Image (cartoon, rainbow, N blue to C red):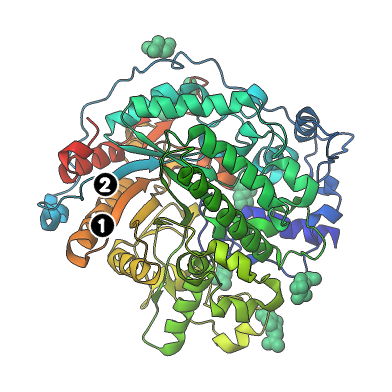
């Protein structure tokens, strides 16, 4: 059983590599997907097994545990780091001469992309006034400086050091944004962006997740926010982008426990009070659906409190996260009503999509609807409609989905000022082969609980044996350039989850196929597939606004440069700049897509919205 459990957790982690995992897929692929369906019923939580059988051969005298030992009031940040560094030290970036430098060399424009046919139909169209044009990032993925200035470990610091065989490196250094943000922001300005979506590291601010605040951590984000504003770039701040404080996981199972709500709330309030004068757009949680669906796998499953098992974990997480979101939003609004901070706007970032039904058959249409309910509706319906989960989810999950009490429903309903969707691709959906009804009643069915056919040819393919769009890197087999479905998707989101504050595409982006295998700089920076993706999507966004009347207010590209892509580490490339991670100087190089994005947006933004 031990061996099996470990294998199960390996499968889950191996399947967890992207920053925004997709909804369905073939679990035997490394890059497939963690949905609630990839939960493995019957898995003993790894906290009950010894990890020694999977630790690397170099480990000696192991005393490590999947749950670091933690005693409230006794265990210190240093103790947690010691337990994290049991096999390998946390690395430190080489000193950089870019630390306070705004210098960089912008190369001449790349050769023309393709004939201009793509943009003919939108040439005359503009994005509306005040349109937010930006890039997105996340603390763990770009900052590095994992231990610096009093930061505490998150589960993403712990897992890769304690279970190196389950990861592709640790985020110790990654892009070293921590020391090079001045230069990185100057580069962003050269792209003309008027906004930058970043996340705060909870454990920089509260090293143990709760309790004592770390002034050095707060001061770092003061500097980043001020530098962005100095560059005429509006900072948009996400409070939580998956970096759960290790202490809270060890103490009470973090998101598995209702105790999470108060600790998140305290952290959120500290951030609102500190930065609310300069930050006017806030995101509480990044892609809660992906985050919660991963709670059955390392590194989140450090500790399940009683009553929670691997099958029900994602739904306890869903519940606690929604309540934490509602509580934080209530406080944000109160602080602004009391004039402690100026008025702003707040929401969370959803992910995934409403798939295109495989055929006109009622069961395929139902499969698509079920997918949308499980992947979007489970968070969006309570917030944007009526405070409660979709009926489909409640009926399928039964007691595994803790109900929202009337008070909680009241708190959550209306707890967003705009709608934000990370929209990388649109799926297709076909009913489970044995029929939806049989699947719904069988918790061990591999397609449970959404009960669409999870095989990739039916989620990223199209009838007739075709792909649904250009395929990204094979290690991100969930990602296809599905531009043709964008307009319908935006119509669906606007109609289903209307918001007075409009719609934002809070992330979209591309893993160029085989980019990681290129060695020549001229090939690395020639990311034609990424350029194509951005041009196609931006074109469709313009048509959505002008022909479909969609209230789209901003778009955020993932990402400004290559970064730590979770389980795939530094090897999966999503950047518009290349970083040579084998060179200690971490030099940045602009890719074609950087210029493409800049030029498309310069052409289509209102002139005053382009940051020149
Ligand atoms: C999943 O992918 C593996 C490896 O490519 C393949 O052997 C297997 O047949 C696939 N399974 C399904 C259900 O598509
Ligand atoms: C998954 O990735 C790891 C590390 O890159 C590799 O060793 C392993 O063979 C891969 N597994 C599959 C099923 O492709
Ligand atoms: C997990 O909990 C759910 C809900 O209580 C229960 O139906 C299921 O059988 C449990 N699974 C395991 C493996 O214990
Ligand atoms: C930093 O060092 C590199 C390599 O020595 C050099 O090419 C570059 O000009 C330096 N940049 C600054 C801002 O000093
Ligand atoms: C439930 O699904 C599992 C896995 O596909 C299958 O082996 C089992 O026969 C199914 N049970 C029923 C009652 O259909
Ligand atoms: C990356 O840096 C290494 C080490 O300095 C160097 O050998 C390699 O050529 C560089 N790669 C590129 C594409 O410049």
Q: Position of residue 313 (x, y in %)?
A: 70, 63
Residue drawn at point x = 54 percent, y = 43 percent: 239
**461 horizontally vs 253: left or right:** left
Q: Quadrant of ligand 6?
A: top left
Find residue 185 and report its image quarter: top left
Q: Position of residue 363 (x, y in %)?
A: 46, 87
Is residue 420 in view? yes
Q: Position of residue 147 (x, y in %)?
A: 66, 27
Q: Nearer the viewer, residue 273 or 450?
A: 273
Q: Secondary structure at mark 1?
A: helix
**589 horizontally vs 158: left or right:** left
Q: Identify the image quadrant of the C terminus.
A: top left
Residue drawn at point x = 55 percent, y = 48 percent: 331
Q: Nearer the viewer, residue 584 or 263?
A: 263
Disc 1 residue lies near ligand 6 with CB under 8 A: no
Q: Residue furthest front?
A: 338
Pointer 1 local density, CA inside 10 Å: few below 14, some 14–19, many at least 20 = many
Pointer 2 local density, CA inside 10 Å: few below 14, some 14–19, many at least 20 = some
For the residues labelled 2 and 1, the Cα–Cα distance comes to 12 Å
> Marks 2 and 1: which is nearer the front?
2
177 lies above or below 321: above
Q: Would you name the residue on which mark 2 appears?
A: 131
Is residue 572 in view? no
Disc 2 residue lies near ligand 4 with CB under 8 A: no
Rendered image: mark on residue 541: 1
Earlier-in-chain disc, 2 versus 1:
2
14 lies above or below 441: above
């Amino acid at each position: 059983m031990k061996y099996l459990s470990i294998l199960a957790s390996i499968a889950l982690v191996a399947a967890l590599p992207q920053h925004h995992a997709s909804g369905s897929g073939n679990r035997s692929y490394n890059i497939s997907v963690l949905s609630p369906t990839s939960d493995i019923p019957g898995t003993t939580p790894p906290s009950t097994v010894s990890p020694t059988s999977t630790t690397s051969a170099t480990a000696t005298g192991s005393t490590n545990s999947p749950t670091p030992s933690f005693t409230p009031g006794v265990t210190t940040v240093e103790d947690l780091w010691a337990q994290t560094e049991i096999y390998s030290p946390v690395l430190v970036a080489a000193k950089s001469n870019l630390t306070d430098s705004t210098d960089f060399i912008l190369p001449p424009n790349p050769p023309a992309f393709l004939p201009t046919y793509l943009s003919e139909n939108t040439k005359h169209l503009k994005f509306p006034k005040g349109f937010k044009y930006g890039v997105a990032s996340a603390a763990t993925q770009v900052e590095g400086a994992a231990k610096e200035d009093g930061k505490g470990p998150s589960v993403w610091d712990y897992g890769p050091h304690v279970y190196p065989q389950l990861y592709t490196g640790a985020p110790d250094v990654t892009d070293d944004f921590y020391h090079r943000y001045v230069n990185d922001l100057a580069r962003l300005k050269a792209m003309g962006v008027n906004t930058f979506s970043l996340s705060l590291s909870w454990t920089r601010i509260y090293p143990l997740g709760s309790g004592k605040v770390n002034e050095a951590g707060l001061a770092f984000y003061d500097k980043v926010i001020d530098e962005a504003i100095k560059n005429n770039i509006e900072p948009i701040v996400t409070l939580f982008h998956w970096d759960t404080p290790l202490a809270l996981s060890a103490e009470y199972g973090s998101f598995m426990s209702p105790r999470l709500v108060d600790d998140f709330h305290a952290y959120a309030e500290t951030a609102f009070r500190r930065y609310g004068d300069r930050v006017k757009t806030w995101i509480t949680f990044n892609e809660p659906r992906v985050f919660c669906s991963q709670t059955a796998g390392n590194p989140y499953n450090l500790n399940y409190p009683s009553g929670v098992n691997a099958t029900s974990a994602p739904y306890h997480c869903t519940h606690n996260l929604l309540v934490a979101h509602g509580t934080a939003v209530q406080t944000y609004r109160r602080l602004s009503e009391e004039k402690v901070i100026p008025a702003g706007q707040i929401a969370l970032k959803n992910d995934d999509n409403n798939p295109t039904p495989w055929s006109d058959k009622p069961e395929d249409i139902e499969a698509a609807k079920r997918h949308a309910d499980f992947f979007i509706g489970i968070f969006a319906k309570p917030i944007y409609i009526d405070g409660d989960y979709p009926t489909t989810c409640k009926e399928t999950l039964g007691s595994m989905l803790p109900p929202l009490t009337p008070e909680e429903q009241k708190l959550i309903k209306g707890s967003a000022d705009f709608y934000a969707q990370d929209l990388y691709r649109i799926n297709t959906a076909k009913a489970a082969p044995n029929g939806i009804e049989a699947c719904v009643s069988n918790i061990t069915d591999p397609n449970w609980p959404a009960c669409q056919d999870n095989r990739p040819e039916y989620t990223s393919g199209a009838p007739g044996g075709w792909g649904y769009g250009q395929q990204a890197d094979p290690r991100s087999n969930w990602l296809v350039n599905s531009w043709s479905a964008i307009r319908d998707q935006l119509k669906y989101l606007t109609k289903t989850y209307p918001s007075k504050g409009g719609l934002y595409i809070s992330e979209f982006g591309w893993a160029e196929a085989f980019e990681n295998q290129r060695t020549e700089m001229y090939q690395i920076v020639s990311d034609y597939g990424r350029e194509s993706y951005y041009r196609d999507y931006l074109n469709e966004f313009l048509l959505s606004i002008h022909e479909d009347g969609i209230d789209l207010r901003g778009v955020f590209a993932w990402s400004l440069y290559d970064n730590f892509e979770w389980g795939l580490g530094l090897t999966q490339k999503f950047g518009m700049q290349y970083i040579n991670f084998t060179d200690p100087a971490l030099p940045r190089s602009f890719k074609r897509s950087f210029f493409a994005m800049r030029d498309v947006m310069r052409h289509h933004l209102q002139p005053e919205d382009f940051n020149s």
